[in-house]
Image: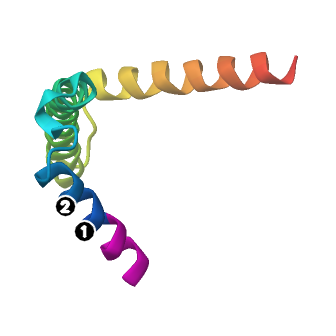
Amino acid sequence: MIMIVFCITQDIKRNLTGGVKMFSKSDFWIGLAVGAVVGVFGYRFMQEREQQMMALSEGASAGQIPLAELERQKEELEDLIAAQKAQEK
């Protein structure tokens, strides 16, 4: 833990004393852009999953699961089975 803090401190000192500036590196900006894109897709994915879970809980309270949800689960399972069979070959 102390070593990590020491390394970070040395890196900050080097950047402040005329070393390579972090914001001038293209790697930083590329990483920032990639992180933002991944964050947006992750957020959308989580929103879709939340809606699916709400639909399941509503269907479970009524005693039925909607047909569209069952078909989606069936397709997902078929894809998983096909992938498993492809790995075995």
> In the rendering, which numbered label is found on residue 9?
1
* Mark 1 surroundings: few (<14), some (14-19) or many (≥20) residues within 10 A: few
Q: Which of marks 2 and 1 is in front?
A: 2
Identify the element where label 1 is drawn.
helix
- Magenta span dominant secondary structure: helix
Q: Relative to 47, is 72 above or below? A: above
Identity of the amino acid at label 1?
Thr
Q: Quadrant of residue 78?
A: top right
Compared across the picture, whether 44 is left or right of 81 comes to left
Front position in the image: 62 or 36: 36
Residue extending furthest toward the bottom:
2
Q: Relative to 19, is 12 above or below? A: below
**Label 2, label 1: how far apart the Cα atoms are:** 6 Å
Residue extending furthest toward the front:
18
Where does the image place residue 84, in percent across and percent down from the top left?
A: 72, 26
Q: Residue at x 29, y 24 (%)?
A: 67
Identity of the amino acid at label 2?
Lys
